[in-house]
Amino acid sequence: MADRAGTAPLPLDPRAVRTAATATDVEDAIRQCGAVLQEVGAVDGSYTEAMLERERSISTYVGEGVAIPHGTLTSKEAVRHDALCVLRFPDGVDWHGEQVTVCVGIAARGDGHLRLLSELAQILLDPDRAAALRGATEVDEVIHLLQPDGEEDSE
């Protein structure tokens, strides 16, 4: 029921965060995102191919060293539940001429990806937050940085 000021936390399972990944290229990075989403039970095996298909049609690079790979509209049936994964590539990945150090993979049923993309864009296009995410080495730190403003949950 949370709106703008108190949006719900993003669906990020701590098991879906990798802070020291390496990839040889864009396809390798996307395949790793798909594998992590599959590991946490969010998607079936066909979803990775849909993520690659999306990337072939339009780059998922969004700026600030971040890419947000996700499937196509026709891949919704491969999604079991909404989820994110975060793979940090400290050495970077050449993403069609841009240097990517953080991939946030998205899996969403229905049009849930629109909400996730919107919330991620607000977070990731903040240069300070994006810089902190690119430098984050702890899973808890990544999860904290990807929560909507006002969702501080430290005890």
Image: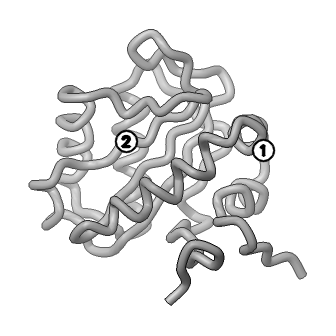
Which residue is nearer to you in this view: 17 or 11? 11
Residue carrying label 2: 69
Question: Residue 90 placed where, x, y %?
Answer: 68, 28
Question: Residue 119 placed where, x, y %?
Answer: 52, 59
Does 5 sit above or below residue 43? below
Task: State yes or no: discs 1 and 2 in contact (Cβ < 8 Å).
Answer: no
Residue carrying label 1: 137
Q: Secondary structure at mark 2?
A: loop
Does 55 sit above or below residue 81? above
Question: Residue 34 placed where, x, y %?
Answer: 35, 48
Q: CA distance from mark 1 to mark 2?
A: 21 Å
Coloration mode = one colour
Type of amino acid under label 1: Thr
Q: Pick out the residue farthest to the left.
A: 74
- Say left or right for 105 vs 90: left
- Say left or right for 43 vs 17: left
Q: Give the residue displayed 37% in from the left and 41% down from the top.
A: 69
Type of amino acid under label 2: Pro
Badge 2: how crowded within 10 Å, few (<14), some, or many (20+)? many
> Residue 128's mark?
none
Q: Pick out the residue farthest to the front.
A: 4
- Say left or right for 140 vs 99: right
Badge 1: how crowded within 10 Å, few (<14), some, or many (20+)? some
Q: Give the residue displayed 54% in from the left and 28% down from the top.
A: 63
Q: Earlier in the sequence, mark 1 or mark 2?
A: 2
